């Protein structure tokens, strides 16, 4: 997956990161951003927690909708394009609902 260029700034020794989604400057810490070991530059996701949560809720609702309508093929396509960390979170939310269908 192509990563967007991250923008950071340091004010009075505090590092701030511009969220690549909402474009807001937020203090770079676990309160505002999820940790991401794969992101060697900053060690955090480049989208803030708020944006990630919104995205996860959106994608979870979408999958729930597809499950209701028994559209398993579309679910597979969505999952294929999702980050592993997001898949984990979505599965946690859906729990056994998603486990009923074999991925
Ligand atoms: Zn954001």
Image (cartoon, rainbow, N blue to C red):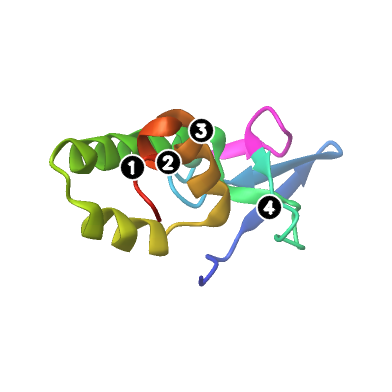
User: Ligand 1 closer than 8 Å to the CB at disc 1?
Assistant: no
- Residue picked out by circle 3: 92
Mark sitting earlier along the chain (3/1): 1
Q: Residue at x 51, y 72 (%)?
A: 2
Mark sitting earlier along the chain (3/4): 4
User: Going by the image, does 13 lie left or right of 49?
Assistant: right
Q: Position of residue 23 (x, y in %)?
A: 47, 46
The foreground one among 22 and 49 is 49
The foreground one among 12 and 8 is 8
Q: Position of residue 36 (x, y in %)?
A: 70, 50
Residue 97 is marked as none
State the image quarter where residue 34 is shown.
Answer: top right
Could you give the CA–CA distance between mark 2 and mark 1, rounded to whole angstroms? 16 Å
Q: Quick one: SS at disc 1?
A: helix
Other-residue count near label 3 (Cα within 10 Å), few / some / many at <14 / 14–19 / ≥20: few
Q: Position of residue 90 (x, y in %)?
A: 45, 39
Residue 81 visible at all: no
Could you give the CA–CA distance between mark 2 and mark 3, rounded to whole angstroms? 10 Å
Could you give the CA–CA distance between mark 4 and mark 1, rounded to whole angstroms? 28 Å
- Residue picked out by circle 2: 99
Could you give the CA–CA distance between mark 3 and mark 4, rounded to whole angstroms? 31 Å
Quadrant for the C terminus in the image = bottom left
Q: Residue at x 51, y 57 (%)?
A: 83
Instruction: Give the magenta-colored segment's residue range.
Output: 25-33
Residue 59 is marked as 1
Q: Nearer the viewer, mark 2 or mark 4?
A: 2
Q: Nearer the viewer, mark 2 or mark 3?
A: 2
Could you give the CA–CA distance between mark 3 and mark 1, rounded to whole angstroms? 13 Å
Q: Quick one: SS at disc 2?
A: helix
The foreground one among 53 and 25 is 53
- Residue picked out by circle 4: 8
Mark sitting earlier along the chain (4/1): 4
């Amino acid at each position: 997956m192509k990563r967007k260029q991250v923008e950071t700034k340091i004010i009075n020794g505090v590092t701030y990161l511009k969220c690549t989604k909402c474009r807001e400057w937020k203090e770079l810490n676990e309160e505002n951003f999820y940790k991401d070991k794969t992101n060697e530059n900053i060690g955090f996701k480049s989208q803030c927690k708020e944006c990630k949560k919104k995205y996860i809720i959106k994608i979870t609702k979408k999958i729930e909708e597809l499950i209701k309508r028994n559209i398993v093929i579309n679910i597979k396509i969505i999952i294929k394009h999702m980050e592993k960390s997001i898949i984990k979170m979505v599965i946690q939310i859906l729990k056994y609902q998603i486990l009923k269908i074999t991925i």
